[in-house]
Amino acid sequence: MSDGLIPRRYAKALYKLAVENGDSEEIYELLKKLSFRHTAIDELKRAVLNPGISDEDKGAYMLQLAGGKPGSSLDKFLLLCVRNNRSEYLQKISLAYVDLYREAHEIAHVVVTTAVPMPEAQMNAIIDIVKKRLGAKSLEIEEKIDPEIIGGFIVTINGLVLDASVRRELNELQLQLLKK
């Protein structure tokens, strides 16, 4: 099985369990935070590879890192991952769960990247344009600062990129000059 198939299957199973137990939103918030905490994931990998730690302790440690409650759907799921030697896929499972949840609840993940913090009025204008384009979907906005884009902005909507950065324009100009 590929790295993509295993996490997707486990994420689907977790989502189904979470919906049945009524804690899909709580797990979504926890896994969204966990999936991007690379230091926590690295700690977790070291712990789950340690043969001196019991499966129950590994599961409890994973739950603690995620911020979940003992006895929850997430708790049971993490123990299942440990017992089935799927702990190494936790970050990918988390990302797959987040994608499934967003898809099921029609949430668009929008990342706006600028070189410097953007004034609120300009940010709101960009968000309004995205809202009109996407229609009824609710938006989850993430703002990022990347000085390397020099100026302008990059908007990423569920992986689709609109690059209006100065860096992109300079790269295009360079390519045009090299062709001549």
Image (tube, grey):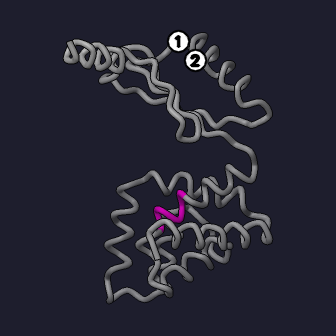
Q: Position of residue 43 (x, y in %)?
A: 34, 66
Q: Is residue 93 magenta?
A: yes
Magenta stretch, overall SS: helix
What's under tag 2, amino acid-wise? Met
> Mark 1: which secondary structure?
loop
- Crowdedness of circle 2 by 10 Å Cα count: few (<14), some, many (20+)? some
What's under tag 1, amino acid-wise? Pro
**Does 83 appear above or below 19?**
below
Which quarter of the figure has residue 14? bottom right
**Which residue position holds label 1?**
119
Q: Does the magenta stretch include residue 32?
A: no
Q: Position of residue 97 (x, y in %)?
A: 61, 60
> Mark 2: which secondary structure?
helix
Q: Where is residue 10 in the image (x, y as percent from the top left)?
A: 59, 73
Distance between the alpha carbons at the discs numbered 1 and 2: 6 Å
| The label number, if any, that marks residue 170 in the structure image | none
Q: Where is residue 137 in the image (x, y as percent from the top left)?
A: 75, 37
Decide if residue 37 is on the left or right side of residue 46: right
Magenta segment, which residues?
90-95
Q: Residue visible at 48% across and 68% down?
A: 90
Label 2 near label 1: C-beta < 8 Å?
yes
Q: Residue visible at 75% across and 49% down?
A: 105
- Crowdedness of circle 1 by 10 Å Cα count: few (<14), some, many (20+)? few
**Does 179 appear above or below 35?**
above
Q: Residue visible at 46% across and 87% down?
A: 55
**Which residue position holds label 2?**
123
Q: Which quarter shows the C terminus?
A: top left
Decide if residue 53 is on the left or right side of residue 129: left
Q: Residue visible at 51% across and 77% down?
A: 60
**Camera-side residue of 116 and 43:** 116
**Camera-side residue of 154 and 29:** 154
